Image: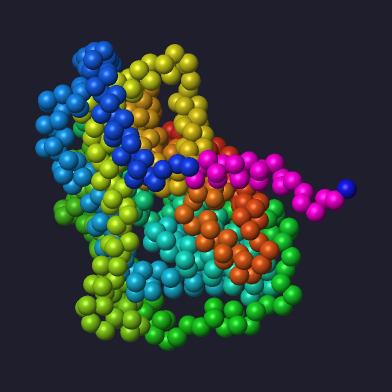
Amino acid sequence: MNNANPSPPLVQRWLNRLEVIGNRLPNPVLLFIYLCIGIIAVSAISDFFTISAVHPVTNEIIPAKSLLSSEGVKWMVANTVGNFIHFAPVGSVLVAILGIAVAEDSGLLGHTLQRLAAKAPPRLLSSFVVFAGVMSSIGFDSGYVVLIPLAALIFRAAGRSPLAGIAAAFAGVSGGYSANLLLGPVDAILSGISTEAIALVAPDRQVLTSANYYFTLVSTVFITVIGAWVNEKIVEPRLPKPTTPSEESSEKLLNDSPALKTAMRRVSLFSIAFIGLLLWLVIPDSGLLRNPDPNGLAALPLLNGIVIFIALYATISGLIFGYTTGKYQRHQDWIAGMETGISTLSGYMVLMFFAAQFVNYFNWTGLGAISAINGANWLAGLELSKISLLLGFIVISASINLLIGSASAKWALMAPIFIPMLFLLGVDPESAQMAYRIGDSSTNIITPLMPYFGVVVAFMQSHDKSAGMGTLIALMLPYSVIFFISWSLLLSIWLAAGLPLGPG
C-alpha cells in the first residue's frame, strides 16, 4: 500500500483544527466592539427583568442598569473619552515605553542580550539562553527579533543544533514571559487592568505594579532551570548536530568593539548609582519616598510610581549607551527613538480604547458585580479550596490563550469577571493575576495564533528548509507541558506556605 502521505500525528491534527477555529475569531478590536454591543443589549434585558444581587459585604442590593435608558445613553456620551483616558493600563504603558524605546533604539537591549548569551560557558549555554529570553520581556519584542535568531547562531558556533538554540530562546522569551528579575511594561499593563476589575466589588482596592514581583523573581530562576533541563534532556537529543561550527557565526558573536565595552561599563556604573539613589530615597527615616506610616510598607510610594523610575532608568541608560557608541549624535536621534517606540503602540492603543469602554460598561451596568456575586455563590457551593480555584483558573487561562494571542486583550476580557468572582471567595486579585500569567505564558509557545509563531518558523527554516509549523510545535510541546505543571505546582506551594507574591 502506498503510504507516501501518512496521516499526521494526533496532536498535530488537533492543533491544525485549533488553528482553523482560531482563525475564525474576529480581530481583538472587533471582539471588544461586539462585547460592548452585547453588554448594551444584555443590560437592557437585565434591567427589564429587574435582575439584581446582594453585595455579600455591605448587604446592598445591586440592580442591573440599562445602557439604553436615558441615564445610560447620557452616561456613555459623557464618559467615552474619560473611560479611555483614565483606563489604568494606558498611561503607565505609555510612560514606560518612552524610556524602554530609547534603551532598545540605542542598541543597549540587543547588545545586552547578545553578550549575556555569547559569554555563556558551554555547559550552561541552554541556561544562559533561556535566562536571556526571560529577561528580554522587559523590552517587549526584543527577544523575538534579536535573541531567537542570535541563539541559533550561538548554538551552531558551539557545534550544537541551531534549532535547539531557537527552541531554548523561544521557551524563555514567550514561555517565560511572566517571569523577570525586573518590573516592566507587562506588570504595569496587567496590574492596571486588575485594579479596574477589582473596583467592581472593592473600589478602594489597588493592585500594585509590583504585586507579583517576589514570585516572578523566583520564577525567573525556576523557569531558567526547568527550561534548560527540558532543552538538554528532551529537545536537543532528538535533533541532529551541524557538521561543523560556523566560523562566520563565531566571529559575529565575538565582535565587541572598544566603544561597546566602554558604553557597557558606563551603563553598569550608572546602574549601581541608580540603585543607590532608590535605596537612599526609601531606607532612611527621612527618605523622600519613604512611607510615613510606620505600620505600612516603607517603599510603598516608590512602588506606586515604579513605572516612572523604570522609564527614567531605561532612558538614561539608553542615552549613555547611544552617545558612547556613536549611535546618537544629537538630541533629535533619541527623540526619534521615543517616537518610534510610541508608534509601535498604535495597535495597542486602539485595542485599549474599546477594552476601556467594555470594562466601564460592565462596571456601570452592575453586570460585573452581579455576575461575580452569583458566580461566587455558585462556586462557594462547590466548596473548593482557594488553591483548587486558582488551579482551575490557570487551566482556563491556558485554554483561552490557544485562541486569543494578546495577553492584555485576554486579561481585559477575563479580569472583570474572574477577579471579582474569586475575590468574593477569598482569593486576592494578586493571586488571580499570577494564576492568569502562568496559564497565559505556558501555552504561548504552542499556539500558531501567537503573533510571532510564524516568525520563529521562518527563523527555523533558515537553518533547516524542511522545518515547518509541526516541527516547532513538536519542539515546544515538552516545554509547554512541563512549564504548565511545574509552575502551577510552584504557585500552589508558594500560597500554601503563606508567602507574599509581592511587596505590599
Instruction: Describe residue 236's horizontal placement relative to residue 486 as left or right.
Output: right
At horizontal 34% and vertical 45% (from top left) the residue drawn is 29
Is residue 256 placed above or below 280 in the rendered structure? below
- Residue found at the very far right of the displayed protein: 1
Horizontal side of 75 relative to 481 (left or right) equals: left
Instruction: Please check the rendered image and state whether residue 314 is part of the magenta-colored stretch, yes or no.
Output: no
Compared with residue 488, is residue 114 higher up or lower down, i.e. above or below? below
Q: Is residue 271 visible?
A: yes
> Which quadrant of the figure has residue 343?
bottom left
Q: Main secondary structure of the magenta part?
A: helix
Residue placed most toward the observer, 428 or 42: 42
**What are the residue bounds of the magenta stretch?**
2-23
Residue 11 quadrant: top right
For the point 22% across and 26% down, which residue is it? 365
Question: Image height check: is 343 above or below 329?
Answer: above
Q: Residue furthest front?
A: 2
In the image, residue 263 sits, relative to residue 350, either above or below, namely below
Q: Residue at x 21, y 45 (%)?
A: 84
Q: Residue furthest bottom?
A: 258
